[in-house]
Amino acid sequence: MRTIYGAAGAMLLLLIGLSIVGFASAAPAPAPTAKVDVNTLPPIVSAAKPAPVSFNAEKAVNAYLGTVKGEARARSDAYFEGGYALLLVDAIYAVAIAALLLWLRISARMRDVAQSVTRSRFWQAPIYVILFLIVTTVAGFPLAVYEGFIREHAYGLSNMSFMQWLGDFAKGFGVQLLFGTIVLTLIYAAVRASGRRWWMWGWLIAMIFGVIGAVIVPVFIAPLFNNYYPLREGPVKAEILSLARSNGIPVTNVYEFNASRQSKRISANVSGFLGTTRISMTDNLLNRTTPRETYAVLGHEMGHYVLSHNAIGLTWFGLVLFVAFAFVNWGYRRLTEVFGGNWDVRAIDDPAGLPVAMALVSVFFLVATPVTNTITRTLEAQADIFGLNTARQPDGFATVTLKLSEYRKLDPSPLEEFVFYDHPSGRSRITMAMRWKAEHLNDPDIKAGPVSPQ
Ligand SMILES: [Zn+2]
């Protein structure tokens, strides 16, 4: 760290030095003697502005929101609000599993097994971690079935048979087992090597793997679950690629994938990092939306790409994770001081204490929900306004937002949105779109576009 600060300090001094030299040489410049002609620029808005079309943004927002009503609105609200309770249920469930592993001394026994297999403390860690991940996944399986399969079917969002779902679950578990074991083994090695400052080194290792994960997910992990292929030919593709080129996005980075294998959800995403950043849209998006809606969504995704949201998001989450590691360090000491004897769990370098750390992580991220949601929701709102400016489809954006209400409540209270929303709500998004439209009513493309309900 010292060398980084040293280098940064040297750069700062160099910059200050250069700017002083710059000011010194600029000071004695001669006064201008040549006559300068000054022409006034024509106003941006022509004086012969036509009378504005009758359009009331607020009325349009309410009219759009009013189109999702009755059964559809009730189901959307129930699905999303159920998610609030599940946040709490997930955390309680995780803490309960950890408590059972500790008080029944299952965790201590798993550590003893690892110690009986090898005397190497390095290799004891992965043996314990593999046992831990298997036991916790089995224990969490009923909740995973409910949340991932039963509930999704109950709301008509899933396209999967149980065997298909189980196949994806098994693949996900395989990926988790591989990377979880590697990361936790290295963190335990760092814990033994660094003593009291283990949590800073643990955080650093987690961040490095966060970056590696972000780079390899679109190339090696995502294709395990779906087929990715270039966009199919046609006028929509031509328009999307033009939009991409105009925003400086390498055209090969626009993909389609068969998300309909898993669900009916309309979505698209920007994944990857450094060299592997790419925009992918679901087949559901292309099949269930109009071209205007598709451009609106793609404009949003291009915003994520152009504004480097993956790097910015990783930075923000790095800060949150730093606090999380500090919290685990603090909480682990307190809890093992009191209960360590009952659990047969020793200091942080004892793998048998992993359930304590995992329970603390669950509690931390439950409490941090408004913070992590506000980070993503803020970036999403930036992508929204970028998308409106580049795709210029305020009504397409509004109608596709209504379609997203299948899985996101449209009209929450501001506090509810602050706490629970990782994307802006339907009301916020349609308000943004109609406000944008109100300021662009006289643009030829907007004039010729769809008429908003009033
Ligand atoms: Zn987004």
Image: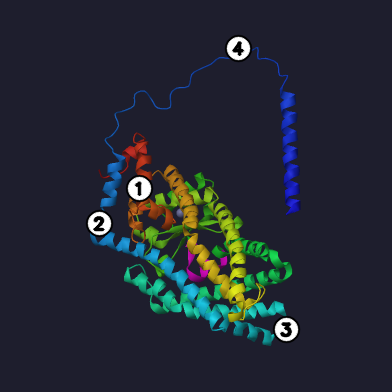
Q: Position of residue 191 (x, y in %)?
A: 69, 69
- Vertical order, 183 against 41 (above or below): below
Q: Nearer the viewer, residue 222 or 185?
A: 185
Quick check: 142 left or right of 174? left
Residue 224, magenta (yes or no) = yes
State the CA–CA distance, disc 1 to disc 4: 52 Å
Q: In terms of sequence position, does the residue under pointer 3 or pointer 2 come before the other?
A: 2
Residue at 49% of width from left, 50% of height from top? Answer: 379
For badge 3, the amino acid type reads: Arg
Instruction: Kindly identify which residue carries mark 4.
Output: 35
State the CA–CA distance, disc 3 to disc 1: 62 Å
Classify mark 1 as within 8 Å of ligand 1 or not, answering yes or no: no
Q: In terms of sequence position, does the residue under pointer 4 or pointer 2 come before the other?
A: 4
Quick check: 164 left or right of 64? right
Instruction: Kindly identify which residue carries mark 3.
Output: 119
State the CA–CA distance, disc 3 to disc 2: 65 Å
Q: Which mark is residue 69?
A: 2
Which image quarter holds the N terminus? bottom right
Q: How many marks?
A: 4
Q: In terms of sequence position, does the residue under pointer 4 or pointer 3 come before the other?
A: 4
Q: Nearer the viewer, residue 61 or 345?
A: 345
Which numbered mark, 1 or 4, is in the foreground of this view? 1
Q: Main secondary structure of the magenta part?
A: helix
Classify mark 4 as within 8 Å of ligand 1 or not, answering yes or no: no
Residue at 67% of width from left, 14% of height from top? Answer: 31
State the CA–CA distance, disc 1 to disc 2: 16 Å
Q: Which mark is residue 233?
A: none
Which image quarter holds the C terminus? top left
Q: Nearer the viewer, residue 294 or 418?
A: 418
For badge 1, the amino acid type reads: Ile
